[in-house]
Amino acid sequence: MTGKKSTRKTDSAARRRSTSPEGGAGGCPMLDEMDKKIRWAASWISPPGDKAPNYYFLARKNFNIAAVPRKALLRIAADARYAVFVNGEFVGNGPARGTHKRYFADSYSVASLLHPGSNWIAAEVHCCLKPSYTMAPFHTALLAELPGMVATDATWQVRTDPSHRPDSLIYTGQIGFSEWKEMPAEPPRWMTGGDGSSAWLKPLVMGEPDVFTGRRVVPRPIAPPENSLLHPAKIIETGRVPFTPGAAENPDYATLIATEPHTALPLPAAPPMTAMNPLVFEPGPGRE
């Protein structure tokens, strides 16, 4: 769920919607490494300072390559959830829920997103620090590497994510915290260093894989979920919600949505919109 809407297009907002059935975007399929014994070059990293129970942080690293290799593998794990990007392009999110004994790592083929010279890898990490059906958290941290090119260590940059509200409410015991993201607060072009480095910090190196928290890091044991973009076939009703001062700051927006008044408008008219173009809904290919 999202607590606020924004008309500003951001890196993550645009690209999370364009995932492929292979588990990634831009031609980046998720790979099966279940039969491989992986020797990680990366270390677990975490931002310094105190963390809220519902905590989000950003991490990134700039690296250079002389030429694009024929194959390039990205491995990543997180405590507890990640969304990862290469050169600002969404690659994938995960991992599968771990256990008190294991973290699961995902592997992606990302050669199509690399180019000679300067490149960026970036991740948004969420750790709610409270177990749920979707997370088995222990300590906020990230583990990632492109073997032979870059790996999480003390040279990365990290910061608390200013666009995610830590005071959002627990949606259910199964799902955990709801997500409240204020899109205008997201640092512009942070995935490729466009926001500068003044707000970024050096990470804490928390430990090596299989040592940190006493949990082993193992490849994902199940197939990745499929992601599809589905368009509505038609608009069946339109309406308007009146502006309520202070409502946008209320973390209990589920109750707010359930109780706020709605004024129905006749079809096919749409509510008047200013400073932006009206939304247009069209059926996707092969749909009616």
Image: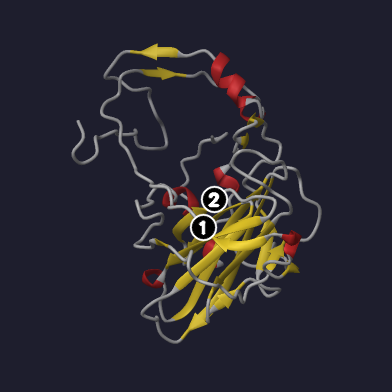
Indicate whether 145 appears above or below 267. below
Q: Amino acid at mark 2?
A: Ala
Q: Percent position (x, y) of residue 14?
A: 43, 50
Q: Percent position (x, y) of residue 10?
A: 48, 51
Q: Which residue of the protein is positioned furthest toward the front in this rendering?
A: 35
Badge 2 element:
loop
Quarter of the image that includes the N terminus = top right
Q: Amino acid at mark 1?
A: Arg
Q: State the residue position of label 1.
A: 220
Q: Nearer the viewer, residue 204 or 222?
A: 222
User: Label 2 neighbourhood size at 10 Å, few (<14), some (14-19), many (20+)?
Assistant: many
Q: Is residue 162 left or right of residue 82?
A: right
Q: Is residue 273 left or right of residue 141?
A: left
Q: Percent position (x, y) of residue 49?
A: 81, 57
Residue at the image position 54 percent from the left and 56 percent from the top? 188
The alpha-carbon separation of the residues under discs 2 and 1 comes to 7 Å
Residue 177, visible in the rendered structure: no
Indicate whether 216 appears above or below 128. below
Q: Percent position (x, y) of residue 265?
A: 36, 14
Badge 1 element:
loop
Residue at the image position 51 percent from the left and 36 percent from the top? 5
Indicate whether 8 appears above or below 239. below
Residue 174, visible in the rendered structure: yes
Q: State the residue position of label 2.
A: 96
Q: Nearer the viewer, residue 95 or 149?
A: 95
